Image: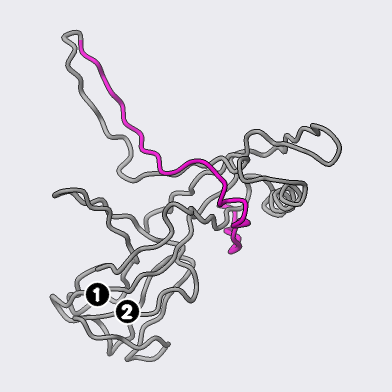
Amino acid sequence: MPAFHDVQFPTAISYGSAGGPKFSTTVLILGSGYEKRNINWAKAKAEYNVAYGVKDRVDMEAVVDFFHARAGRGYSFRFKDWMDYKTGAQNIGVGDGATVDFQITKDYTSGAYTYTRDITKPVDGTLTGVYVNAVLQTEGAGATEYTIDYSTGIITFGASAIPAAAHVVAITECEFDVHARFDTDQISITHDFWETMSWPDIPIVEVREAQA
């Protein structure tokens, strides 16, 4: 699989983009008018069109540079979804005395139902606190500390800091990006008139992380 480039798509352009999370559901309408639904994707996969965020030649040149550097669809990158880029304070797991790795997650709750999303691209420096059993832990690479992998969103505890059984692991609010890529290999720019250009459809799609 081609590499991930740990670089963020220009945020001033993503701010004006359109799109968001997408599910896949097959709906079968029976002859009686009743229906059956099959949920094909357990997890959402976002799609965006960033053309709406390109306001002038400077913006277009930034997109063209970014596109070339990513080799079109070849290399994935970070994308800030301005509608949804913070976790809020979040419980991310419960210790068992042996597990050292905990995935940063975000819960979306409506009524009695909760959808849990893995956060694989947290933004470096925005997570300021990790708690175990309501006790603030110390970040670092030692046995009594924890580390954060900002390319996977996994928090790893040292040998002497492993959360005990039934102890809740929680985080403070942190920012995150979407792991994304261009969904085209071709630039299609129209020169509308002097110094004015447009690219009507610049598709970007989320890259779903493979499960280990």
- Amino acid type shown at disc 1: Val
Tell whether 190 sits left or right of 113: right
Q: Nearer the viewer, residue 12 or 122?
A: 12
Find residue 166 and report its horizontal and vertical position in percent: 13, 75
Q: Earlier in the sequence, mark 1 or mark 2?
A: 2
Measure how far apart labels 1 and 2 are at the Cα level: 7 Å
**Which quadrant of the view contains residue 102?**
bottom left
Tell whether 204 sits left or right of 65: left
Report the disc number at residue 169: 1
Q: Is residue 27 magenta?
A: yes
At 79% from the left and 39% from the top, the residue drawn is: 196
Residue, far right: 194
Find residue 119 and report its horizontal and vertical position in percent: 39, 61
Tell whether 181 sits left or right of 144: right
Q: Are marks 1 and 2 in contact (CB under 8 Å)?
A: yes
**Which quadrant of the view contains residue 91?**
bottom left
In what element is the residue under mark 1?
Answer: strand
Q: Quadrant of the C terminus?
A: bottom left
Find residue 148 and report its horizontal and vertical position in percent: 42, 76
Tell whether 38 sits left or right of 77: left
Q: Which residue is mark 2?
A: 130
Q: For the magenta stretch, what is the residue range?
A: 1-30
